[in-house]
Image (tube, coloured by chain):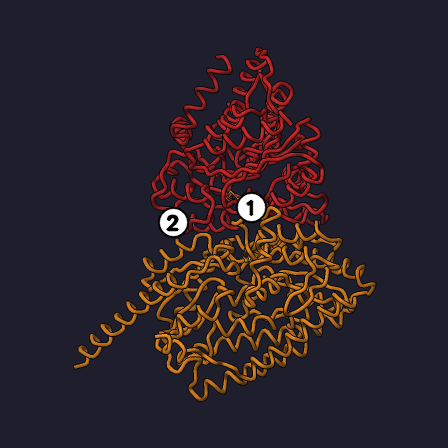
Chain colours: A red, B orange
Amino acid sequence: MGIHEMVAQYREMLEDSPLNLVAEWKAKHPGSKVVGCYPVYTPFEIIHAAGMLPVGIIGAGNRLEIAHADSRFQSFVCSIVKSTLELGLIGNLESLDGIVFHSICDPARNLASVFKRNFPKLQVEYVHFPQNMASPHTVNYLAAEYRTLKSNYERLAGRPVTDDDLRKSIRVYNEQRKLIGQLYRMRREAPQNLSTLETYVLTRIGTLIPPEEHIGLLKEAIAAAKERDERPKDRIKVVLEGSFCEQPPLELIEGLEAAGCYILDDDFLLGWRFFKQDIPSEGDPVENLARAYLNQSVYSGVKHDTREAKSKHLIDKVRETGASAVVILAAKFCEPALFDYALYRRALEKEGIPHLYLEFEEKMWIFDKARTEVETFVESMLFD
Amino acid sequence: MAKTAEANKTNYQGQMHLLQKELMGNYFNQMTRAAEHGEGKAAYMLISGNPVELMLAFDLIPVYPEINALQLAVKKVALPFIQKAEEIGYSMDNCAYVKADVGLFLGDRKTPFATIPLPALILCNYVGCNVYLQWFEHLAEYCDGTLYNLDIPFMRDPSGKPTAADVTYVVRQLEEVIEICEKITGKKLDYAKLKRIVALSGETGEIWSRIKGLTKNVPSPFDSYFDSVTMMAPLYCLRGTEGGLKFFETALKEMQEKVDMGQGPLPEERFRFVIEGPPPWPYLRTFRDLFSKWGAVAVASTYSTVGGLWEFGFKHDSNRPLESIASHMLEWNLTNRNFLQRYEQIRRYVEEWSADALVIHSVKSCRLFSAGQGDMREYFTKELGIPTLLVESDIEDPRYFSEAQMKNRIDAFFESLEHKKIVRGAAAAGGAT
Ligand code: SF4
Ligand code: SF4
């Protein structure tokens, strides 16, 4: 299959009813369990090591109408919280045996409780990620947190998880991340050969299938993408930031590039590219996972590391990729992303890096306004 | 109509209110002296589960940007600060406490109540609210103070208790905070002094908890929302001091007298309600009057437990000062407990404080409180059959308060409650004959 066909096929799956993929997997693996993972930074390895399938529960896109959840969560709460709850309330999460939330923001945290009350059959887990990255004591805390999670998943899976199981899973996810990284690198080096939408679809499909399958698929896609040799268009090069949790509609991602920019790097689905380096598979695997979160995880609006200013990461990313501008694409009502913007704006202005600020909503249908704004921004840069 | 509202206005000015004014005045003056004359060093903290005891042990001046923000709102001067923050990139949809404070911080930090000193220590006690992390991350970018994220693991275990690892982790961090304070102040920790302060906190908390128990009386001697907020500032700023303790002793005595005389904050107590959510500071008086006119008194509130939850049995223990500060931060405050624990807290209030109804004040700024309150309403009305009203406005931003709409909702709610009361009364009377 060529890359074009691959992307078209996966895109259709993502747009149709992505959770069908999960139901199909479950039907083929009787007795197996599935755990939904709300964004971000889920330690998938622990779920996978218990022989269960971790799948991304990342909202419901723009094809689901919210009919029930908006009476539970107010108008000023981001879309993903409501659409995720809606999926549960209309019975679309039946194939899940568990779901895990993390301490990323106040709405997501309250959502974990609401899930617990409304879906008593689901095993709802909540991980408190440490926010004191600088203390030498934190690693023990997080390792203890992961051990509790592991024993809860042993209970759900009905089997023990050995250190070797964990090491194996760590290696699998290392490989998956490495391949996604490769895909991103290819795009950064020759964005005319691989679009942002394509990397996005190829990555996102991996949130719904076993990582081993995703690895095969990524290898095929990378090989196919290498065949391409397009001529670069006259576009500005940007870095996109702010969409680490709720995801914009595919049409919007597509439209941003079409409006005249190459997105050299982005933070979409941060959840599947947590770490920059491999997690060591030797030694105590739980501790390795904990250390990886503390010392190697990529930054985002929901991690507050006092060791380094957050905006520095963004500036570095711009410099490293050779982009000339930044597009901030924040989910409406996403407080972490909105707060970050104030810091980013200050730092970008100081560094003289132009930026464009946009907001999106998962349920968005009309993209003209966003497109015009990008076009105007691009023009102002091209003809400056 | 206006006349009735006027007549129903509570002009509650007891000893406690006067003493509060005096003590808080002193507290703000101390801040101003630090800001303008460099007398003492300031430690910024957040209200939720604050470890004020540690700061006092080092004679650091505790400064709470939340209290400054709420004072700005009460004095109706918050909006220009909020707008200033919005001009530099803060969103319409960000917590307005942060925006008001940032607007203030980036200017000359002068307010009608104090000049706010710059922080030597920016101690982000992350007790539940994720916005806290952002807030202090931002302040640290805007000044030279030392930022420390004191990470408090959330109550996520089904037992509702912290794990052993949680407690160790917090105690170890408190020890690190001590080291930082030693560096900032050039003083070693005086352990005996810390113990004395923690003992004072223990006594203060106990009296506060007794005060809050008094609203179980009918009529309730004070309003556990609108009057409790008067007592909350001393609880956070002065807990662990002799003056703070004296304040609470005075308040207890005064409230007990009211109980003995069968007095309440209103001429007549006709409805008892529990209220969930922070108050609309810019319209506090207006909001209160909307309830007062119905003879409705709040007998318990979740908001008054953000800094600590003493009424269900917590007491600081001076024999284990650090462990007990850790326990307060982890377990014994509203904000670090999960949403379902809050449902349970409210359920207990309704039952044990014999309330007729639940009012949920849903504020846009504070998603810690508000996100999911629709589900809470569902639980209380459908599962428990407790009449529940949900109204929306904001804690800080005056642009989100619509008096007419608020009045309609509140009136309709109490009208229907009254109707139910009459029907129930008639049925009871009918049954008796
Ligand atoms: S989109 Fe933002 S506010 Fe919403 S759940 Fe995700 S991190 Fe929280
Ligand atoms: S979100 Fe709520 S608790 Fe957090 S800073 Fe704002 S008002 Fe305070």
B88, above or below B281, in the image: above
Query: Which residue is the extreme one toward the bottom?
Result: B261
Chain of the residue on which disc 1 is drawn? A
Viewed as shown, does residue B379 lie left or right of A199? left
Please name whichever residue, B272 or B226, is drawn nearer the observer in this view of the structure. Answer: B226
Q: How crowded is mark 1: few (under 14 residues within 10 Å), some or many (20 or more)?
A: many
Tell me what residue is drawn at x 60 percent, y 52 percent: B85
What residue does disc 2 label?
A118
B241, above or below A24, in the image: below
Quarter of the figure that contains the C terminus of chain B: bottom left
For disc 1, does the CB lie below 8 Å from ligand 1? Answer: yes
Q: Distance between the residues labelled 2 and 1?
A: 21 Å
Residue type at tag 2: Asn
Please name whichever residue, A377 or B267, is drawn nearer the observer in this view of the structure. Answer: A377
Query: Which residue is the extreme one toward the front?
Result: A383
Q: Earlier in the sequence, mark 2 or mark 1?
A: 1
* Disc 2 element: helix
Q: Inspect this view and state whether residue A146 appears.
A: yes
Cβ–Cβ under 8 Å for marks 2 and 1: no
Q: Nearer the viewer, mark 2 or mark 1?
A: 1
What residue does disc 1 label?
A104
Percent across and percent down for residue A62 are 41, 34
Residue type at tag 1: Ile
Q: Inspect this view and state whether residue A161 appears.
A: no
Give a yes or no on whether discs 2 and 1 share a subunit: yes
Percent across and percent down for residue B143 are 73, 53
Percent across and percent down for residue B107 are 68, 57
* Disc 1 element: loop
Percent across and percent down for residue B291 are 39, 71
Please name whichever residue, A311 or A24, is drawn nearer the observer in this view of the structure. Answer: A311
